[in-house]
């Protein structure tokens, strides 16, 4: 097996002697690429943003922005990475580098003051600059969509980048001013070729090992041999543990590039979503076909996180405040668990058994999530948090209702942040089903919903506030549906 190497700004760079737990951020800075900064080490500020060549949705390759502070450098074995330094052209010998168009706009429009966050903003902006399909939102007149510029730039691309001194208006001005990549732009041309194939990696240093098996059977065999191994995909959770709590694992197994975990297909009675597809990939591939998921995605952390985070990881951590479990519970989803002996399918409402615990056995892996069809026509996701985007939920509520002839025929409600696990609001569902969808029904069911779960007081919200928001969310749903009918 070839020694791990990463292509950084066009140059192959060996991983050794970095320990397996080394983040891509530390790896890059140790090689002199100090434009990549550490601001939070949690994936919240975007100062560490870099570009990675990943399988594309509309073209063979997409340039995807990720948080280098969370990604293990070993996970980039065989991959191509571009930093803020690599965006600039080399220029003539003895002259300053030629600025990339996004760097040029940031400079001339005053988008940088102290400059600490600027390289991260530039990389996130560059990913959107190169996104195929950006022109679909183009409107030179300015348009009515406040989250897209006249050049089609999606401001969500910058939702994971924080600036503490410049102010966001000049940064937004720079984003809305960039044009289209020139025909000779090498990074634009690179999109027409396939990204590097995932490298099978076995890297050991200081008695710790990072493994990326080539196939799912190889992975399941390793999990049977190493039940203590930490399994990572996007590493958006494990990366925080490494950085903030100094956690170190004797063995890490990466599953993010396994083909068997990256499929998305639709059957007559369900949609199957691979557990290692990133949320951004799912969002673009589904293209609104599951409206409840489409409502979830913009509220799930930031684009930088969604470019790495997976449904398998979100369910695997078992967090009671994850945003996807309430939605998947409302959709009556199930998880496909695989081990060396075969597969089994478990309904999600039977998957969680306690705080960060589940029915998943040692050696088992989440291979896919299945969403049954047909979908309920009335859906909504309400996330109550201190910030509109890029925040952890105080309460999350997902609704999926079948309403026929003014009567609720079926109701499924998923809750997060009000118990030790994500839960179904079974009593509220029963209070709705078979009853007319009226203000009286909504008021009565809201009183039931306020009593669901066992909310607690913490720094995000009080138990009383959480209970109140549960009931209020159902009243909000009723108001939204009646407004939709009346309009």
Image (cartoon, rainbow, N blue to C red):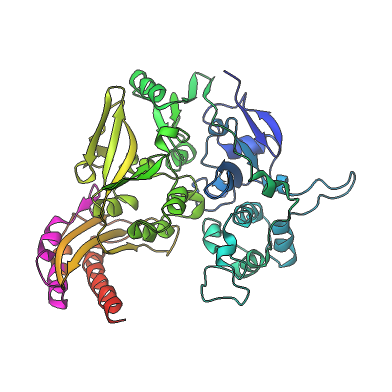
- Quarter the N terminus occupies: top right
Q: Position of residue 232 (x, y in %)?
A: 43, 34
Q: Toward the viewer: 303 or 164?
A: 303
Position of residue 288 relative to residue 35, above or below, is below
Q: Position of residue 268 (x, y in %)?
A: 28, 48
Q: Toward the viewer: 272 or 13?
A: 272
Q: Position of residue 422 (x, y in %)?
A: 25, 50
Q: Position of residue 110 (x, y in %)?
A: 71, 66
Asked whether, in this view, residue 37 is left or right of residue 356, the answer is: right
Residue 203 in sight: yes
- Quarter the C terminus occupies: bottom left
Q: What residue lies at 29% left-to-right and 74% top-to-bottom?
A: 480
Q: Is residue 430 a member of the stretch shown in magenta? A: yes
Q: Is residue 472 a member of the stretch shown in magenta? A: no
Asked whether, in this view, residue 436 is left or right of residue 27, the answer is: left
Q: What residue lies at 23% left-to-right and 64% top-to-bottom?
A: 470
Instruction: Please report the bounds of the magenta region as a residue range.
Output: 417-445
């Amino acid at each position: 097996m070839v020694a791990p190497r990463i292509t950084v700004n066009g140059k192959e760079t060996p991983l050794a002697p970095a320990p397996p737990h080394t983040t891509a951020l530390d790896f890059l800075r140790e090689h002199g690429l100090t434009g990549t900064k550490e601001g939070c080490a949690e994936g919240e500020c975007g100062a560490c943003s870099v570009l990675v060549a990943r399988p594309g949705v509309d073209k063979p390759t997409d340039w995807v922005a990720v948080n280098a502070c969370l990604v293990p450098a070993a996970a980039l074995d065989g991959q191509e990475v571009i930093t803020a330094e690599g965006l600039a052209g080399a220029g003539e010998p003895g002259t300053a580098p030629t600025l990339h168009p996004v760097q040029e706009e940031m400079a001339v429009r005053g988008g940088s003051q102290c400059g600490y966050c600027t390289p991260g903003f530039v990389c996130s902006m560059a990913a959107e600059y190169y996104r195929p399909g950006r022109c679909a939102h183009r409107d030179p007149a300015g348009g009515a969509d406040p989250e897209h510029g006249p050049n089609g730039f999606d401001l969500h691309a910058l939702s994971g980048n924080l600036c503490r001194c410049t102010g966001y208006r000049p940064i937004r001005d720079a984003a809305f001013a960039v044009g289209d990549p020139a025909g000779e732009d090498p990074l634009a041309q690179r999109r027409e070729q396939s990204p590097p194939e995932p490298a099978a990696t076995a890297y050991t240093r200081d008695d710790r090992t990072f493994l990326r098996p080539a196939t799912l059977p190889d992975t399941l065999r390793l999990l049977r041999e190493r039940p203590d191994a930490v399994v990572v995909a996007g590493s958006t959770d494990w990366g925080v543990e490494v950085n903030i709590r100094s956690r170190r694992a004797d063995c890490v197994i990466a599953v993010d590039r396994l083909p068997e975990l990256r499929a998305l297909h639709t059957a007559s009675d369900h949609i199957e979503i691979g557990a290692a597809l990133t949320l951004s990939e799912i969002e673009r591939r589904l293209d609104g076909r599951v409206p409840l998921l489409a409502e979830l995605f913009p509220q799930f952390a930031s684009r930088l996180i969604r470019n790495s985070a997976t449904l398998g990881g979100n369910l695997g951590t078992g967090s009671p405040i994850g945003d996807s479990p309430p939605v998947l519970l409302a959709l009556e989803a199930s998880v496909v668990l695989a081990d060396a002996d075969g597969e089994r399918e478990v309904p999600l409402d039977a998957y969680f058994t306690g705080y960060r615990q589940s029915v998943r056995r040692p050696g088992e892996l989440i291979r896919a999530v299945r969403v049954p069809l047909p979908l309920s026509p009335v859906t909504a996701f309400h996330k109550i948090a201190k910030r509109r985007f890029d925040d952890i939920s105080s309460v999350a509520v997902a609704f999926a209702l079948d309403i026929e002839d003014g009567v609720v025929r079926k109701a499924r409600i998923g809750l997060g942040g009000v118990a030790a696990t994500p839960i179904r609001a079974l009593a509220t569902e029963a209070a709705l089903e078979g009853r007319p969808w009226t203000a009286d029904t909504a008021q009565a069911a809201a009183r039931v919903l306020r009593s669901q779960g066992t909310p607690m007081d913490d720094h995000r919200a009080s138990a009383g506030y959480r209970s109140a928001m549960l009931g209020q969310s159902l009243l909000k749903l009723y108001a939204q549906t009646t407004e939709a009918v009346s309009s």
